[in-house]
Amino acid sequence: MARLEALTVVGTDVVGRWESVESYALDAKRGTENRAAGSGASSTKNPSPDWDLGQGFDLVFERAINGWPEVSERIRQIAMPIVSKVTQHVEQDHYDFVDDGSTASGFDVATALTGEPSCWLQHRTEIVDGKGQRIVRIGAMFSNHCGIRGDAMVRRGVVAAAIAYCLEAAGYGTEIVALSGQREGSSRMWSIVKVKRAGEMLDLNRAAVALANPGMLRRLQFGIVEGDERVHRDIRSNGYGIPTDPSSDMLKAEGIDHFVSTDVVNLDDAGIVSYVLDALRKQGVALK
């Protein structure tokens, strides 16, 4: 059987890493064509409006390759009013010379050696024109329990994409990874899909699929699970495993600065805006 080469076994965990949504989708397609013995076929079962928004495997695969304009437009509609609140300014540190050592935050030895009497330094910050240099790495789950409706999974993905959109508008660089976690007993399966690298333009069409399309889990991820004996043996003994979020240690190891978890699925549009604004503040974005 042809194995999915992106998957490796680490202890009792199966870990998969993909460098793009396209490569992930191609492996999922290969998985459906090389199902492990005895594996079910949820990845290619009949579409359902609630379960996968009526998308069969082929449609999800096509969108993973070409994008999902309908939802990328929804992301823009949510994000644009927030972008108007985001300044294009950043905070800059300054150190001024002062005579009063009691209010100083430091002492400039080099200046003192020149004979300059005012060598005490007072720290201050100033908002100046310019883009932020920080890279913010966003991690967003695309797995969920089977009872979660597809449209709720879309809302969670809109949250993650809107955060990235607004951070980019504020001058920050962003990286985005989509994650899925499934467990069964002591075994775990982690899928980590790179959606955007720092320095690349944010492609909302592609991000919409990776972050917001329920078919990422219910078509493509299921295809991954079905197509490899190692996953089938450890995870597929009871359905497709139980969704699980990564631990704080795993998020730290992956360098995730902001994590959108499996439970961010029940927000209305006002709740999405509130969540995004809070996430921006936590990353140090100045808001008008």
Image: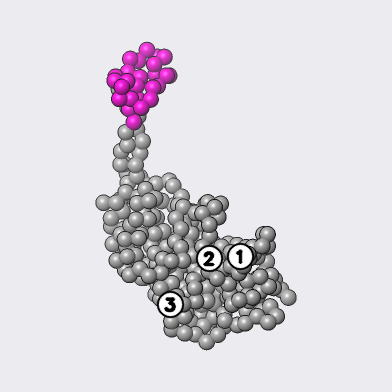
User: Which residue, given by chain and number where applicable, does mark 1 sit on?
Assistant: 188
Mark 1 in CB contact with mark 2 (< 8 angstroms): yes
Q: Nearer the viewer, residue 170 or 55?
A: 55
User: Which residue, given by chain and number where applicable, does mark 3 sit on?
Assistant: 149
Amino acid, disc 3: Arg
Crowdedness near tag 1: few (<14), some (14–19) or many (≥20) residues, C-alpha within 10 Å: many
Circle 3: element type: loop
Residue 144 in picture, x, y percent from top left: 49, 71
Precedes in sequence: disc 1 or disc 2: 1
Circle 2: element type: loop
Residue 54 in picture, x, y percent from top left: 46, 83
User: Which residue, given by chain and number where applicable, does mark 2 sit on?
Assistant: 244
Amino acid, disc 2: Thr
Q: Which residues are magenta?
A: 99-123
Precedes in sequence: disc 1 or disc 3: 3
Where's the N terminus, which quadrant?
Answer: bottom right
Circle 1: element type: strand
Camera-near label (1 vs 3) is 1
- Position of 10 with respect to 137 (left or right) is right
- Distance from Cα at disc 3 to Cα at disc 2: 17 Å
Residue 161 shows up from this direction: no
- Distance from Cα at disc 1 to Cα at disc 2: 9 Å
Precedes in sequence: disc 3 or disc 2: 3
Residue at 51 percent of width and 69 percent of height: 143
Residue at 32 percent of width and 33 percent of height: 124
Residue 203 in picture, x, y percent from top left: 45, 64
Coloration mode: one colour
Residue 212 shows up from this direction: yes
The residue furthest right is 1
